[in-house]
Amino acid sequence: MQLRTFIAIDFSKQLKEEIKEYINLIKPKVQGHWTNYENMHLTIKFLGEIHQSDIKKIYLALEKSLFGIEPFFLRIGGLGYFPGNKTIRVLWLGLDGDLEMLRKLHFRVEEELGFVGFPKESREFKPHITLARDVIADINELPVYSFKNPINVKEMVFMKSELVSNKRVYTPIFRLPLKEGNV
C-alpha cells in the first residue's frame, strides 16, 4: 500500500489557534487557497509516496538522525512569500530562534534517509509555515503580528497525508522524542 508522507515538527494547539487568529486578521486582504490551521506544521522533509513496508527503515533512519539533537525553541518571525508567475505561489510565516539546531536536524534527516535510499532535496532548506497558496495580495498592506507562543521542538513526527471527504488530513504514523543529553 502506498502512503503520501512527510517528516515534520508539529505545533501546540495554542500556537495553531494563534495562527488561526492571524489568518482571520489577514484573510479579508488576501485571496488564496488557505491551509487548514489544524494542519499547521513545519516540514523537515517531504517524502511523497512510500510503500508501507518502508516505515521501519524510515523509523530507524530518523531515530539515528536525532543523535546530538536536543530539544530547542523556535519562534514565528515575519511574513514572507515565494513568488509565482502571476500570483504569490506561497504565503508563509518565517522562523526565528535556534535556527542552527533546526538546520542541523534537517541535515541529519537528509543524511540518514539518503543512506536508506531516499534522495536528498536539491533545493535549499527554507524553513517556513505555509499559510496559503496561489495568493493575490499586496503583502505590504498586511498587518504585522507578534506571536506569543513559541515552538517547543521536543519531537519529530512522521505523518501521512490523505484526502478525507475532500479535506486534507495529516495523521501521525509515529513520533520520535528529542532528549536532553542526546549524544
Image: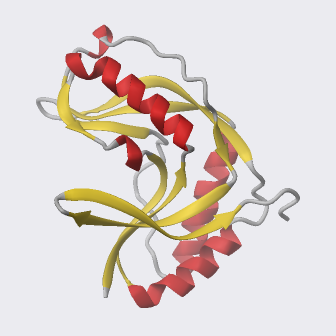
Residue drawn 23% across the image and 65% down it? 164
- Front residue of 132 and 86: 132
Indicate whether 154 appears above or below 135. Answer: below
- Residue 71 visible here: yes
Farthest-out residue, right: 181
Quadrant (top left, top right, bottom left, bottom right) of the N terminus: bottom left
Q: Position of residue 114 (x, y in %)?
A: 52, 74
Residue drawn 27% across the image and 57% down it? 168
- Residue 135 visible here: no
- Front residue of 158 and 118: 158
- Front residue of 37 and 51: 37
Q: Position of residue 104 (x, y in %)?
A: 66, 52
Residue drawn 34% across the image and 18% down it? 25
**Seen in the image, is 141 located left or right of residue 183?**
left
Quadrant (top left, top right, bottom left, bottom right) of the C terminus: bottom right
Residue drawn 83% across the image and 62% down it? 182
Indicate whether 55 appears above or below 9. Answer: below
Q: Position of residue 134 (x, y in %)?
A: 18, 36
Number of callouts in the render? Answer: 0
Q: Position of residue 122 (x, y in %)?
A: 40, 58
